[in-house]
Amino acid sequence: MNRKQLLVCALVGTVCSMDSIASADSPVMLEPTIGRVQQIAHIYYNVALNERVVTVLGDSQTAPADTGNSVPIWASTGGNPCADQGYLSSFYFAVDDPTNTSMGGATALATNITVLDMGDIALDTVVDCVQVNWVVSHPDADSDSDSIGDGVEELAGQWMVWDADNGRVVNQSTRLPLVEFLFFNLPGNIAEPGFLSGYTLDVDLVAGFTASDLTFEIGDSDGDCQSASFCNSNIANMDNDFDSLPDSDLDGDGLFDFSWTVRFYQPGIGNDFDSDSDTGSAAPSSSDSIGINFGFPEGSATDNGDGTWTWNIDTMAEAAGTGAEDGFAIYNPPIPGVGITHNGFYWFGGFACEGDQYTPPAMFQFVLYGPAGGGCSPADVNGDNQLNFFDVSQFIQDYNNGGDYNGDGATNFFDVSQFIQDYNAGGCP
């Protein structure tokens, strides 16, 4: 198995760790967090090139990697799914809230919890960009007038992507970590009075050549990471519980099960991620809430006529968030020597667009991007959906920069041989 932790920065730097977490099962009802959220900005950030571009949000909240060849491949995007029914309420989920109220009074879950959401995706999917988000009440300033907060000292968020996991306790032997990001000094609240600030962040993993390429493959089935820099080799064929069924399709829909987690770190609790001897403000106050946007895949809401509603996913739409469920898992804060432990599976009572206020779906905003048109052949290394001189030129450039084309951890003759074999096999228009 080829696992690789990405050391990236929170617009400046990062720290990584690999916590082991369990699974989730029976849903328990929670209350969503109600608050007026003003979407402030979209941030594009390339972890390899240390490039950052800020876009003030208008109608769009997403943008692909700046390679020009990246497209959404899995998405549960933010918004109000009941807007057509006239609901104007604003919700988010306070993942870390010192007031404890966002977790229904469950004080053990008020801070340092981990939230897990899940979905299904096609085997051997290459990801070159990941979108995350946060909704924040921590006061901040915009002294440099770049339309985002300057950054709250030691306010951090940790996002991870996991292979072979559908978030349930029915099979605890499957989940494997794939990639992790820890962003610190996150921009805080600069919204109008009475509002919280919302941010989206596209984490671009492409640097232009393999030696510094940080792309990854979800659901590898053949030991070949394709154009990605790394993957969990042959994860799609593993049977760690020896039940003669692949661990990667626990719901039996023919797609690969994956999940993602988020955990936030409050300032003033001893962390010094940027090594400046400043651990942030005093202990978190009742106003220091941070969470994530609700999301939903492409589709439509249907009134079932019995007090329940169904969100119908449009599986034919681009980047359909297949496998997204009206539920999510929560994990307890890490215990020294034990790690993160499963707390339970949660929802908000069932998605509905009726009553005094609508009930949001228990899905959260998350987007994966992948190379556009690069699936016709592994030798299409420049992702233009053609095999020609430009692919040969790109391969030579990658090879000279230490590129590992066949994914065996070395740069040598076998990479050249595999590239020639794939190139001669054709398969592109």
Image (tube, rainbow, N blue to C red):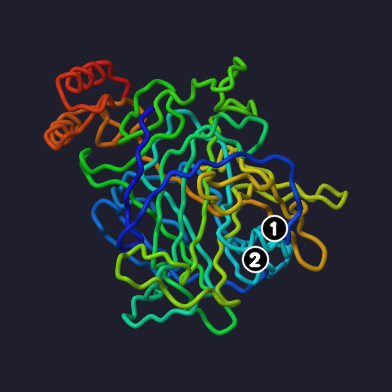
Which residue is pictured at 62% across the width and 28% down the height?
250
* Residue at the right extreme of this rendering: 306
Residue 239 location (% of width, % of height): 54, 20
Which residue is pictured at 27% across the width and 30% down the height?
380
| Mark 1 nearby-residue class (10 Å; few <14, some 14–19, many ≥20) | many
Q: Which residue is nearer to you in this view: 118 or 57?
A: 118
Considering only order in the chain, which callout, 1 or 2, is on the residue closer to the N terminus? 2
Which amino acid lies under the numbered mark 1 shown in the image of this protein? Pro
Which image quadrant for residue 427?
top left
Residue annotated with mark 1: 360
Residue annotated with mark 2: 91
User: Disc 1 on helix, strand or loop?
Assistant: loop
Vertical placement of 42 versus 399: above or below?
below
Residue 154 location (% of width, % of height): 41, 68
In this picture, residue 340 sits left or right of residue 17: right
Vertical placement of 222 versus 196: above or below?
above
Q: Are marks 2 and 1 in contact (CB under 8 Å)?
A: yes
In this picture, residue 159 sits left or right of residue 373: right
Vertical placement of 422 versus 196: above or below?
above
Which amino acid lies under the numbered mark 2 shown in the image of this protein? Phe
Residue 244 location (% of width, % of height): 60, 15
The dot on residue 125 is none
Can I make out residue 185 in this image?
A: yes
Vertical placement of 33 versus 252: above or below?
below
